[in-house]
Image (cartoon, rainbow, N blue to C red):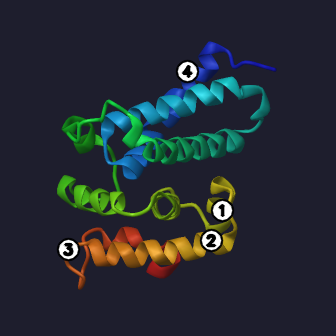
């Protein structure tokens, strides 16, 4: 099994970490836990390097591993003695290029996402924050396209009921696809 050379892997980590950390944060709502989940994804990629052949394969592998690590973490959270603190790292939050306009808007959306079941949360993050299509989301999560569609519908309905102003939910533009905006 082929291992990546250090320079190649370092470049990959530098190029993909910020986007993966954002995705992980949207899934878990905690910057420290997001960083841990990203590290898990890169460690697993390093171990599976010989099986992942293309750049698209690397991206898909990282996303899938990250989402599964986050879901697994949520499942066993009540068994852990240590619980991550809920304090976000404001310097990272304020500097990243996000689709949400302000820190408070992002916090409202992330808080609403955290209230969803892990499957719905994963589907919404992949579809609307990572711009995956239905088929790509299904492939990454290992579910059918019908499951992605139903989880998306249920997740969006739940988000609409959770967000503070039903007439114009904070971050509403994040909950529509590019096709719907056209």
Across and down, in percent, residue 105 comes to: 22, 61
First in sequence, mark 2 or 1: give its number.
Answer: 1
Dots 2 and 1: beta carbons under 8 Å?
A: yes
Dot 3 surroundings within 10 Å: few (below 14), some, or many (20 or more)?
some
Q: If the image is split into quadrants, where does the N terminus sit?
A: top right
First in sequence, mark 3 or 1: give its number.
Answer: 1
Query: Residue 92: in sight, yes or no?
Result: yes
Q: CA distance from mark 2 to mark 1?
A: 8 Å
SS assignment at label 1: helix
- The residue pinned by badge 1 equals 138
First in sequence, mark 2 or 3: give its number.
Answer: 2
148 vs 104, left or right, is right
Which dot, 2 or 1, sits closer to the camera? Answer: 2
As drawn, the label of residue 147 is 2
Q: Nearer the viewer, residue 84 or 98?
A: 84
- The residue pinned by badge 4 equals 10
Dot 1 surroundings within 10 Å: few (below 14), some, or many (20 or more)?
some
SS assignment at label 4: helix
Query: Residue 176: in sight, yes or no?
Result: no
Q: CA distance from mark 2 to mark 3?
A: 27 Å
């Amino acid at each position: 099994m082929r291992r990546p050379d250090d320079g190649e892997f370092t470049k990959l980590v530098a190029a993909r970490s910020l986007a993966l950390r954002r995705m992980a944060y949207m899934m878990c709502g905690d910057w420290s836990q997001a960083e841990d989940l990203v590290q898990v994804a890169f460690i697993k990629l390093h171990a599976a390097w010989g099986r992942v052949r293309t750049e698209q394969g690397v991206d898909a592998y990282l996303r899938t591993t990250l989402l599964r690590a986050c879901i697994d973490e949520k499942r066993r959270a009540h068994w852990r003695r240590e619980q991550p603190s809920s304090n976000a790292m404001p310097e990272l939050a304020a500097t990243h290029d996000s689709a949400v306009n302000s820190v408070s808007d992002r916090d409202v959306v992330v808080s609403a996402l955290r209230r969803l079941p892990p499957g719905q949360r994963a589907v919404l993050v992949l579809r609307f924050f990572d711009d995956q299509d239905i088929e790509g989301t299904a492939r990454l999560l290992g579910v059918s396209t019908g499951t992605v569609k139903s989880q998306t519908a249920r997740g969006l309905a739940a988000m609409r009921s959770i967000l503070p102003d039903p007439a114009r939910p904070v971050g509403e533009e994040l909950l529509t696809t590019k096709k719907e905006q056209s």
